[in-house]
Amino acid sequence: MPAIRTKVLLLDTNDAMGGVVRVHVSLARELDRCGFDLYVACLGYGHAWPLFRELPETHRWTIAPGTKSRRIALGRLAALADVASALPLAWTVLRLAYLCRRAGVQVIHTSDKRRAVMLSIALHRLTGIPFLYHSHNRYVDFAANRQALVRAAAIVSVAAEMKADFVHARGHDMERIRVIHNGVNTSEFRTSGPADLRAELGVPADAMLIGITSRLAPDKGQEAFLRAASRVAAQEPRAWFIIVGDDAIASDNADYVPRLRQLAADAGLAARTRFLGGRRDMASIYRSLDVVVNAAHCEACCMVLLEAMACGRAVIGSRAGGTPEIVTHDQDGLLFDVDDAADLAEQMLRLARDPARRARLGAAARATIESRFSISVQTRAIERIYTELAAKASAS
């Protein structure tokens, strides 16, 4: 007699690539299909859709949760768009409730994104299906979020620092949050494989490539990176600076890319700086870089650092959020003070001038990922929660 599999709905309302999407896709790929039936509810368009569409052994339900296009995400039309989005959101809730009942879904897995939170609460009210609330950031105070934290059958945070922020904001009830760090597919992000960025860009073979990869927005620290780069360029003529990412996720980044390009030009870096936009060949990008930087003002559990470390790269991260839970300074990477371009430049130069240090840190970084941050470690922990919640629901 075949084993009974737990039916899980993974809810994703993102229309652009980001850390949450990468976490969801990695979990979905790794989930044990012998023990779980996976249903994914996601948008049927945008940069994230091809990744969900390619998932094997997965039931896909496309949704329209009332997300706004980039044209109306900011400015006067944003408030009107919020009101207009209520209709597709309501229809999505009713449709998902029907599909969940028909399929026999037992657990809903949601992120902390606003639309996902609202959908999860509504689905829980209509169906009684328990949901796992997966926080990828600091606590954000809005009515639906407060309600979701009360109603959630389980809460997971990707970093102890983020859990502490929830406890501080919402009290000791948030001590029930379980910390499960993000994980990386160590077969996809590995030390060997294509690394042909130098040929693509036409830079010298002995160029020192220092890169920053993330969405382009002020809180991600690209300006500090470029200020640091100007200091490094003055002392290291082999250094080239690579900026990977786009501004597809609209938040506070209006006109940000032109500002970055102007900053590079004003610092005399235009000839040695390359903006690559969003890329899907990130493993190859990481392996091509000599140093990978994350300069964000606050990351919960930075996927960029985890992926680069899995590729054996020497990394530099800011002392903020959950990054010090990933990187141990001068053991498997380097840390610098947030928005301190002088400190960042010093760490860049240390690595640029010392290939032995880069190799040592890169090897240690890979070992750290294998022991603590692999996708199998994360997924097995999440699977245990799915099983626990399904069993409790069946017993009640």
Image (cartoon, grey):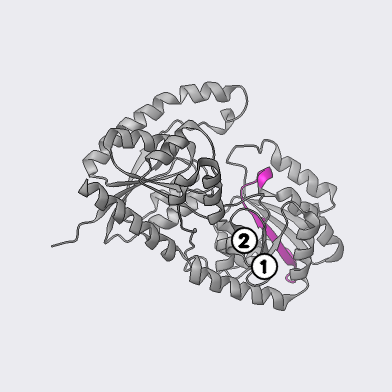
Q: Position of residue 329 (x, y in %)?
A: 67, 67
> 70 above or below 267?
above
Identify the element where label 2 is drawn: helix
The magenta region covers 202-219
Q: Mark 2–mark 1 contact, CB under 8 Å? A: yes
Image position of 286 (left or right of 268):
left
For the view shown, which residue lies furthest in the right direction?
Answer: 234
Q: Which residue is mark 2?
A: 324
Image position of 93 (left or right of 225):
left
Q: Position of residue 79 (x, y in %)?
A: 55, 23
Counting other residues with Cα less than 10 Å from the Cα at mark 2, is it few (<14), some (14-19), or many (20 or more)?
Answer: many
Residue drawn at x 40%, y 39% is 150
Q: Amino acid at mark 1?
A: His
Identify the element where label 1 is drawn: loop
Q: Position of residue 357 (x, y in %)?
A: 70, 75
Q: Which residue is mark 1?
A: 329
Q: Amino acid at mark 2?
A: Pro
